[in-house]
Image (tube, helix red, strand yellow):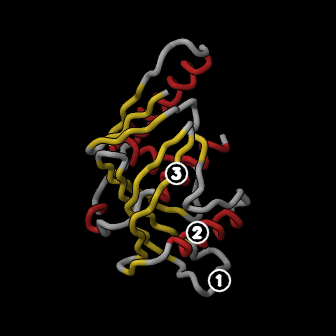
């Protein structure tokens, strides 16, 4: 479950940079699509329990399904900090995103605004069962920023939620026996 939480956060962190808020406006959350992703995860887990020797398989999920799943997880976990994460998925493991962070109920360092929209673009790097996001650009609203500011927000959020802090450039183990991730236009293939 720890790896699953990290993948959720890194996916969230992966979502927010160059394209700006208008690209993410008006997209709806589909519970049906989110539950389709949950069923896919269950299928992967069941197949992993059968053991090795079945060859590499893949599940392809659409951008809309992944965004619905992320919204579903935020709702289910009743996130007090990350209120929205939207992804745009491009070929060659390129990804863009938006993360809306709400810290109004928290005791904050004066450096941080209580509400923040981060936009980013980067590349998912996958190596030996681990993944990380290599950021190309990061914005807070329309201001280009250094990744250290988002690292600070992650650190504050980790302290508030009593979870282990991490940094944007950390490598995270892929959950559920996932071996690789490859993206196309509006979709991602997960190999297990």
What is the secondary structure assignment of the residue under circle 1? Answer: loop
Q: Secondary structure at mark 3?
A: strand
For the N terminus, which image quadrant? top right
Q: Secondary structure at mark 2?
A: helix
For the residue pair 105 and 132, the one nearer the viewer reads as 132
The tag earlier along the polypeptide, 1 or 2, is: 1
Q: Residue at x 30, y 55 (%)?
A: 27
- Provide residue 5's location: percent of width, then percent of height: 61, 47
Picture residue at 71% right of the left edge, 57% below the top = 164
Q: Is residue 7 left or right of residue 61?
A: right
| Residue farthest along the front direction in this orientation | 127
Q: Earlier in the sequence, mark 2 or mark 3?
A: 3
Quadrant in the picture for residue 51? top right
The residue most toward the right is 162
Give me the disc on residue 132. Answer: 3
Task: Tell me residue 39's x, y (percent).
Answer: 47, 28
**Residue 37: x percent and y percent?**
44, 35
Q: Which residue occupies 61% across, 73% down?
A: 152
* Residue 41 relative to residue 137: left or right: right
Q: For mark 2, what is the residue? A: 151
Could you classify mark 3 by the number of other residues whose Cα lies within 10 Å: few (under 14), some (14-19), or many (20 or more)?
many
Q: Position of residue 67 (x, y in %)?
A: 39, 48
- Extreme residue toward the bottom, this view: 110
Distance from label 1 to label 2 (Cα)? 14 Å
The 10 Å Cα crowd at callout 1, few under 14, some 14 to 19, many 20 or more, is few
Residue located at (64% from left, 59% from top): 166
Residue 98, quarter of the rendered image: bottom left
Residue located beneath label 1 in the image:
109
């Amino acid at each position: 479950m720890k790896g699953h939480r990290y993948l959720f956060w890194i996916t969230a962190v992966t979502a927010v940079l160059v394209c700006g808020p208008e690209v993410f406006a008006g997209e709806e959350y589909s519970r049906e699509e989110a539950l389709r992703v949950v069923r896919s995860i269950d299928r992967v887990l069941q197949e992993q329990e059968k053991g090795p020797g079945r060859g590499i398989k893949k599940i392809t999920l659409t951008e809309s399904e992944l965004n619905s799943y992320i919204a579903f997880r935020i709702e289910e976990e009743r996130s007090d900090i990350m209120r929205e994460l939207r992804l745009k998925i491009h070929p060659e493991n390129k990804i863009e995103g938006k993360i809306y962070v709400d810290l109004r109920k928290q005791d904050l360092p004066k450096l941080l605004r209580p509400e923040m929209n981060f936009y980013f673009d980067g590349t998912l790097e996958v190596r030996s069962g681990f993944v990380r996001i290599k950021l190309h650009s990061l914005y807070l609203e329309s201001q280009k920023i250094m990744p250290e500011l988002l690292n600070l927000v992650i650190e504050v959020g980790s302290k508030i939620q009593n979870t282990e802090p991490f940094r944007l450039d950390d490598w995270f183990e892929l959950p559920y026996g996932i071996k690789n991730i490859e993206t196309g236009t509006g979709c991602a293939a997960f190999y297990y």
